[in-house]
């Protein structure tokens, strides 16, 4: 579904990404892991169009180059995202926040739109809270609202940046279940994560970035035993 080819991105003298390539298979959960500053979010920003790469190319659905398109065009093509740092409208209601995902639509169809939002609210367990201001929700529910807004754009590919970040154990499990359910509904997922166990549990394929470079890729089992990966994570614990 997505091909990231040889992407390089400099911030002044800092190479945040050094020729990174990866592919995302349709219908799979692909994960991007790696230490702080590895370049994970930078790559998401480039895929979603909020940053332009210095070189390299991104191909979506085989024919669409989305390398230098603005974010709204990339969203129109079928890529939606959530953010590492919370990015919702705190004083708007849950319903209104999710509705924001519909603003990309060229045609206004009140009935279809209302039904779509109701389905998303129900899927995320937020139906009872539809009219509550988002600021009054628990952190996990706020994550669901952001995911709901992304779903409202009817994406084919979902980019989830640290959806698990800052949550406690049972909440992590809930998010994992939702992500797996999304895969079974036919969505393709590219997720970034720090919490290694849940990422290992849910991923069909994992890429490991370190200091702007891809250092490993494989299934959870092979990544778990990859010496270079173990060294990177052990160094962090020292
Ligand atoms: N807009 C920016 N301007 C300058 N430097 C940046 C910018 N965005 C990111 N960086 C730098 O690029 C590098 C990669 O950052 P990035 O946020 O992509 O890492 P990350 O892998 O997402 O890390 P984390 O796990 O902490 O979220 C870091 O050194 C960061 O400080
Ligand atoms: Mg990040």
Image (spheres, rainbow, N blue to C red):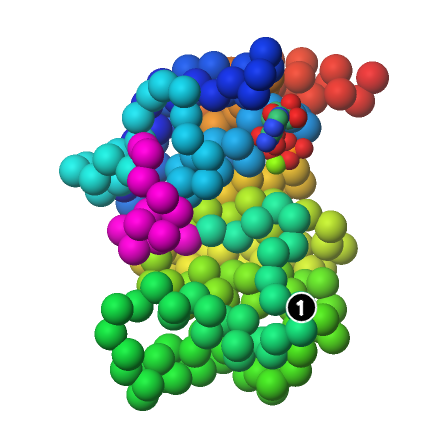
- List x then y, in percent, for residue 38: 60, 24
Residue drawn at (33%, 21%) of the image = 56
Residue 44 shows in this picture:
no
Relative side of 139 to 112, left or right: right
- List x then y, in percent, for residue 218: 44, 26
Task: Quarter of the image for the C terminus: give it.
Answer: top right
The question of residue 41 being in magenta is answered with no
The question of residue 77 being in magenta is answered with yes
In this view, 222 is above or below 180: above
Nearest to the observer: residue 3 or residue 153: 153
Residue drawn at (61%, 66%) of the image = 89
Residue drawn at (21%, 39%) of the image = 64
Magenta residues (range): 67-80
Residue drawn at (58%, 16%) of the image = 12
Task: Quarter of the image for the N terminus: give it.
Answer: top left
Ligand 2, by image quadrant, is: top right
Residue 38 shows in this picture:
yes
The residue to which callout 1 is attached is 90
- List x then y, in percent, for residue 215: 51, 16
In this view, 97 is above or below 189: below
* Quadrant of res 225: top right
Relative side of 202 to 196, left or right: left
- List x then y, in percent, for residue 226: 56, 18
In this view, 150 is above or below 62: below
């Amino acid at each position: 579904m997505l091909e990231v080819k040889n992407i390089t991105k400099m911030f002044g003298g800092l190479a945040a990404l050094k020729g990174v390539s990866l592919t995302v298979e349709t219908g799979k959960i692909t994960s991007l892991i790696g230490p702080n500053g590895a370049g994970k979010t930078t790559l998401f920003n480039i895929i979603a169009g909020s940053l332009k790469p210095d070189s390299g190319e991104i191909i979506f659905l085989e024919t669409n180059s989305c390398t230098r398109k603005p974010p709204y065009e990339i969203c129109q093509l079928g890529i939606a995202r959530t953010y590492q740092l919370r990015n919702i409208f705190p004083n708007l209601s849950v319903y209104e926040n999710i509705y924001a995902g519909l603003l990309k639509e060229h045609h206004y169809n009140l009935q279809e739109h209302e039904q779509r939002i109701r389905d998303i609210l129900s899927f995320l367990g937020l139906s009872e809270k539809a009219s509550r201001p988002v600021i009054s929700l628990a952190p996990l529910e706020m994550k669901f609202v952001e995911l709901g807004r992304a779903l409202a754009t009817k994406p084919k590919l979902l980019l989830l940046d640290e959806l698990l970040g800052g949550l406690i154990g049972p909440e992590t499990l809930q998010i994992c279940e939702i992500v797996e359910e999304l895969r079974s509904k036919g969505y393709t997922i590219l997720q970034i994560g720090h919490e290694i166990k849940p990422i290992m549990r849910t991923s069909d394929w994992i890429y490991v970035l370190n200091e702007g470079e891809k250092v490993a890729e494989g299934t959870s089992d092979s990544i778990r035993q990859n010496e270079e990966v173990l060294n990177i994570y052990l160094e962090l614990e020292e």
